[in-house]
Structures are given as C-alpha cells and as structure tokens.
Image (spheres, coloured by chain):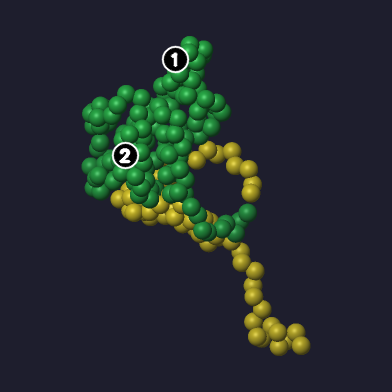
Chain colours: A green, B yellow
Amino acid sequence: MKTNITFKNTTIECTCNALTPILYREIFKKDFFEQLLSFTKVKSYDKIVENKNNPEAAKTIDPEDAAEIMRRSQVISEIAFIYSKQTEITDVERLMNLGKIDYYSWLSGFENGTFSDSSALSKIIELWQSNTTQTTESKNV
Amino acid sequence: MKPKDRAFTTPLLLLRAKQLGLSVAELNLLSFGFLMDLLTEQGNDSFEYPNKATQEDIDSFF
C-alpha cells in the first residue's frame, strides 16, 4: 500500500506492508501491534490534542494526559518514519539496519508538533487498515 | 468467531511467516491482509471437507 499523507503542511510518501511491523520492532524495539492497540485506550485523544493547542484550555490538561500526548506523538512519528523509509528504500537489509540516528535526523526535518496534529493518528491507522484487507474465510470457525 | 486470548505480536507474525516459508524480503512484497489470507488457507488445509456424492453414489441410491 502506497499513498501520500500530509501531516500539517508536510506531505510524506508512505508505504506499508507485511514487513512494517517487523521493521518497527527491529528499529524501535517496541511491538507495532501493541502500540496501535494502545491508541484505543484513551477515548478523548483528539479533544486533548485540540486543548493542547488552545493556551487557555491547555492549562487544564492533566499532566498524565500531556505525557500521553507526547508518547503518542512519538509513536506516530516513528510509524511515519517506517512508512517513509519503506517508500524510499526497497533494499530489505538496509531497511532492517536503519538505526535511531537515522530516525532523529529524519525527525529534525519537521516542524515541532507536526506529529501531534489531531488528524495524524487517523492517517497512520487508515493506511495500516487499507493494508489489512482479507478475502479468505476460515473453514475452522 | 471464537474469542482468542493470545495477543497477535510482531514475533508471532514473523514465526507464522517463517512457517509459511516466507523470507523477510518476501514480506516486503505482500500486504498484511494477504499474509493473513495465506495463514487462513494454511489453517483450511486441515479442515475436513464433507464428501461430495459421486455419480456412483447417486446410482446406488436409486
């Protein structure tokens, strides 16, 4: 699956496939599926992010919620990094060896807060979901 | 669908892919959905399909 995703004003060419979770695990030492599932635990994520951008409302944000925004923004940017590199680099060995240094230098090219935009999460998940379409039914149900 | 208590993780994904005989490089050519379809079909291999009646069965019935 290949598409362009715009985060704030920056458009990134993105690709994801069956290798994406393995690359994510290899480069960031975290489980891709666990990270995606964790996004469903806090229902008011969009509201929290919107409030963060409103100086008055931001004062009322719980410190735990603020920490959650930081964590989520990081995961979104990590997944966007993998998506982006899968488009740029087709050599699997090179992909597997992308280190954290590459990630931080890639991240420095973006405006601060790019990946905490409230629409960033849905764009990341939409691309992953478009990659999960199944056509075969199990006979063992 | 039966409830499952085993979480799907990345190591489990790679294990299943290797059981299918796929290399890491080959995973770069497949969508995740296609890989899951392959696993479903692998599971279907062990399904006991009901026997279809042959012409001989029908003839002996009448």
Q: Please say if B43 is above or below A118.
A: below
Q: Give percent across and percent down for residue B21.
A: 38, 55
The x and y percentages for residue B25 are 30, 50
Q: Earlier in the sequence, mark 1 or mark 2?
A: 2
> Residue B58 vs residue A134: left or right?
right
Query: What residue is at 31 percent from the left and 35 percent from the top?
Result: A10
Please state the chain letter of the residue tagged with numbered disc 1 in the rendered image.
A
**Residue drawn 66% across the image and 78% down it:** B53
Q: CA separation, marks 1 and 2? A: 27 Å
Chain bearing mark 2: A
Q: Position of residue A125 (x, y in %)?
A: 45, 40
In the picture provided, is A133 more to the left or to the right than A83? right
The amino acid type found where label 2 is placed reads Thr
Which of label 1 and label 2 is nearer to you? 1
Q: Label 1 amino acid?
A: Pro
Q: Secondary structure at mark 1?
A: helix
The answer, for residue B17, to whether it is visible in the render is: no
Q: Give percent across and percent down for residue A23.
A: 33, 39
Mark 2 surroundings within 10 Å by alpha-carbon count, few (fewer than 14), some (14 through 19), many (20 or more) = few
Please tell me how crowded label 1 is: few (under 14), some (14-19), or many (20+) other residues with Cα within 10 Å. few
Q: Please tell me in which quadrant of the rendered image residue A7 appears.
A: top left
Q: Is residue B12 above or below residue A106?
A: below
Q: Quadrant of the C terminus of chain B?
A: bottom right
> Residue B52 occupies which quadrant of the picture?
bottom right
Residue A12 left/right relative to A39? left
> Dot 1 corresponds to which residue?
A55
**In the image, which disc is placed on residue A11?**
2
